[in-house]
Image (cartoon, rainbow, N blue to C red):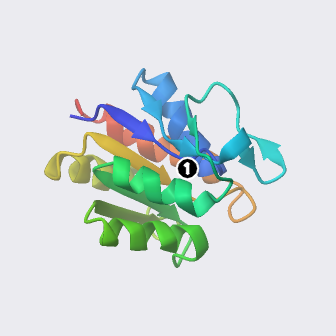
Amino acid sequence: MLKKIISCGQTEADQAALDIAIKLRIPHGGWTPKDRIAGADIIPERFKLQEMQTDNYSECIKQNVIDSMGTLIISNGSLIGDLDYARKMALRHKRQMLGIDLNQTDDAKGALLINDWIHLYRIDVLHVIGPDAEVNPYVRNQTEHLIEGALTMRSV
């Protein structure tokens, strides 16, 4: 049973996952860089995130992977940069991982895959990481539909 959703809160996809947790009244959290910096913006206070002692985003990703049972990586095509780093950290720390490529999977199929994965591997703490709007202007809506669909499909 899913007990918590965590993320760094850095990207539109990250924040969409946290917003769905809030909407569905699922506890949320995660590690974020010092001073809640997200590019040129500040991560909103509505997200109950812990600040690390560093502004190194990679350290936040690593800690969120370690603190979760499974990492959901949302992408638009190949995993590059931080998304590939999250994949490597999940493998290194022997955590479950699921990749959803928004270019290859529609919302309904993606939600079903996520729901089945959470149940199959008994994911209780879910780490979500994905791209920002610069990569995909629709990523916030797509991420919200995926996660909300997965979590409301049946009791998780």
User: 149 or 43: nearer the eye?
Assistant: 43
Identify the residue at horizontal 50%, vertical 23% (top origin).
23
Is residue 54 rendered to the left or right of residue 105? Answer: right
Q: In this view, does 47 lie above or below 32?
A: above
Which image quarter holds the N terminus?
Answer: top left
The answer, for residue 53, to whether it is visible in the render is: yes
Identify the residue at horizontal 41%, vertical 49% (top origin).
127
The answer, for residue 107, to whether it is visible in the render is: no
The quadrant in which residue 155 appears is: top left
Q: In this view, does 12 lie above or below 46?
A: below
x and y, in percent, of residue 150 in the image = 34, 42
Farthest residue toward the right?
40
Q: Name the residue under label 1.
A: 142
User: 29 or 152: nearer the eye?
Assistant: 29
Is residue 28 rendered to the left or right of residue 19? Answer: left
User: 106 or 6: nearer the eye?
Assistant: 6
x and y, in percent, of residue 75 in the image = 53, 66
Label 1: few (<14), some or many (≥20) within 10 Å? some
Is residue 66 rendered to the left or right of residue 118? Answer: right
x and y, in percent, of residue 86 in the image = 46, 66
- Residue type at numbered disc 1: Gln
